[in-house]
Image (spheres, helix red, strand yellow):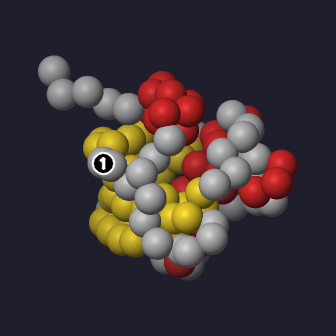
């Protein structure tokens, strides 16, 4: 059975893959967004069913809200065929200055790179 802490790692891997493809890098000198680093401020998860077998799962995430200095992600962890919902939740990520480690506004470039993830209320 997958340990509950691993669900956060599944989400982290999925989110990081998205940002790495868009030019973010762990080394600010190599990143398209060099003046910021993201820190998780809050993480909330509701578990519905345990993952009990080795195999592929899906992690679906989106941005529910873009603030001045933060994003709020929504996410779901589902079976590969999407028939089973294992967990869902939200994660708030704050943009910090690499120099001061205090919140700074999201850059226009960063918000543009995030735009495909942003869900708009209908």
Quarter of image, res 70: bottom left
Q: In terms of depth relative to the viewer, which is nearer, 89 or 110?
A: 110
**Split into 4 quadrants, where in the image is the N terminus?**
bottom right
In the rendered image, residue 6, in percent from the top left (x then y), is placed at 58, 72
Quarter of image, res 98: bottom right
In the rendered image, residue 93, in percent from the top left (x then y), is placed at 44, 60
Quarter of image, res 20: top right
Q: In terms of depth relative to the viewer, which is nearer, 13 or 87?
A: 13
Give the residue displayed 40% in from the left and 71% down from the top.
41
Q: In terms of depth relative to the viewer, which is nearer, 92 or 107?
A: 107
In the rendered image, residue 47, in percent from the top left (x then y), is placed at 35, 67
In the rendered image, residue 113, in percent from the top left (x then y), is placed at 56, 31
Give the residue displayed 55% in from the left and 64% down from the top.
97
Residue 72 as seen in the image, left or right of residue 28: left
> What residue is disc 1 on?
67
Q: Is residue 86 above or below residue 114?
A: below
């Amino acid at each position: 059975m997958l340990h509950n802490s691993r669900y956060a790692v599944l989400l982290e891997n999925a989110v990081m893959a998205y940002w790495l493809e868009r030019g973010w890098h762990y080394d600010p000198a190599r990143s398209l967004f060099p003046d910021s680093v993201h820190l998780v401020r809050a993480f909330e998860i509701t578990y519905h069913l345990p993952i009990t077998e080795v195999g592929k799962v899906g992690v679906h995430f989106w941005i529910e809200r873009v603030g001045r200095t933060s994003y709020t992600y929504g996410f779901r962890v589902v079976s590969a065929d999407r028939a089973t919902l294992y967990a869902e939740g939200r994660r708030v990520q704050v943009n910090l200055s690499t120099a001061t480690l205090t919140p700074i506004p999201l850059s226009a470039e960063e918000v543009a790179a995030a735009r495909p993830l942003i869900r708009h209320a209908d």
